Image: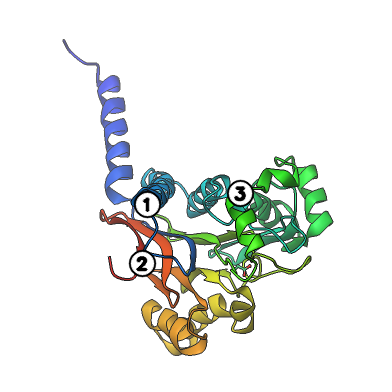
Amino acid sequence: MLIPNKTLAIIIFCFLTTATIFSQNKYTIVIHGGAGTISKDMPDSVKEDYYSALKEALSIGKSILHLGGSSLDAVERVINYFEDNPKFNAGRGAVYTAEGKHELDASIMFGKDLSCGAVAGVTGIKNPISLARLVMEKSPHVFFFGEGAEQYGKKMGVTFVENSYFDTEKRFEQLKKSQEKIKGTVGCVAIDNEGNITAGTSTGGMTNKMHGRVGDSPIIGAGNYANNKTCGVSATGTGELFIRHNVAFNVSALMEYKGFTLQQAADEMIFNRLPEGAGGIIAVDKEGNYSMVFSSSGMFRGVADSEGVFEVKIWKEE
Ligand code: GLY
């Protein structure tokens, strides 16, 4: 059968387009599901649950980037996954405040133009990272808190839930043992095929925190930062320390002003500036190099890139 020239041209065009998308896309994505004291004695089935959740989160981001999607979409969707999974301290699995409620924080930053959005102290927003993105893209502002953030969410049509939606038995047990300061947070940083870096961070904060307390996660420069000139960073750990040391911005600043590599800058902040056990960061630089460092006993984390790297880890030695 003879194929008409026009049809042949269309077939070749589709083939080349698809081949281009799959062969030339260059990307790196890193994720974290919180750092802290993570016991190696947890049952194997629980470990496996964490590994498979991390793999699922990473696959969501990887497939978006692999198909030529933006780092913004990848970061938002990965964090939505974490927010909907009760294992992680963000969204559904958010920790309790001292008053037995949930107050959630999140932020997102786009390194191409330094645009960013953040929300803090929200109590009825199912996916705070998506509201943070709306603040960034659709409002003239950067940061909304409490009732004002919820009002803006209503106006933008985001999904609302009752505060009890965030109730989970595991977190309630942690509140009862209030000396156990659970500090997990979730985050994702990615660079896409266009060289745009996005960083996002979402959290329920710290177990037993005082009403109104805000941590580092929604504070641009402390728990989250992205700049295409340098890198993107998402932090997890004791928020107060990350705020005092302006950790995420300082990683970028050390690279820009002092010529540090990403790894040197990350090590400097986590091991030389912060007290031991403060937490960790995940980061990606403008070349697609990545760093995942922490000074706690473990950090739920993962990395994937266009060269075929795909791994998830919890402890230092694995
Ligand atoms: N790093 C999360 C918090 O302290 O709220």
Farthest residue in the left direction? 1
- The amino acid type of the residue labelled 3 equals Glu
Tell which circle, 1 or 3, labels the residue nearer the N-terminal end.
1
- The amino acid type of the residue labelled 1 equals Tyr
Q: Residues within 10 Å of mark 1 (few under 14, many from 20)?
A: some
| Depicted 177 relative to depicted 164: above or below | below
Q: Residues within 10 Å of mark 2 (few under 14, many from 20)?
A: some
Q: Position of residue 151 (x, y in %)?
A: 82, 49
**Disc 3, SS:** helix
- The amino acid type of the residue labelled 2 equals Trp
For label 2, the residue is 315
C-alpha gap between disc 2 and disc 3: 25 Å
C-alpha gap between disc 1 and disc 3: 21 Å
Residue at x-position 65% and y-position 67%: 178
Q: What mark, if any, has residue 51 been given in the picture?
A: 1
Tell which circle, 2 or 3, labels the residue nearer the N-terminal end.
3
For label 3, the residue is 169
**Disc 2, SS:** strand
| Depicted 96 relative to depicted 256: above or below | above
C-alpha gap between disc 1 and disc 2: 12 Å
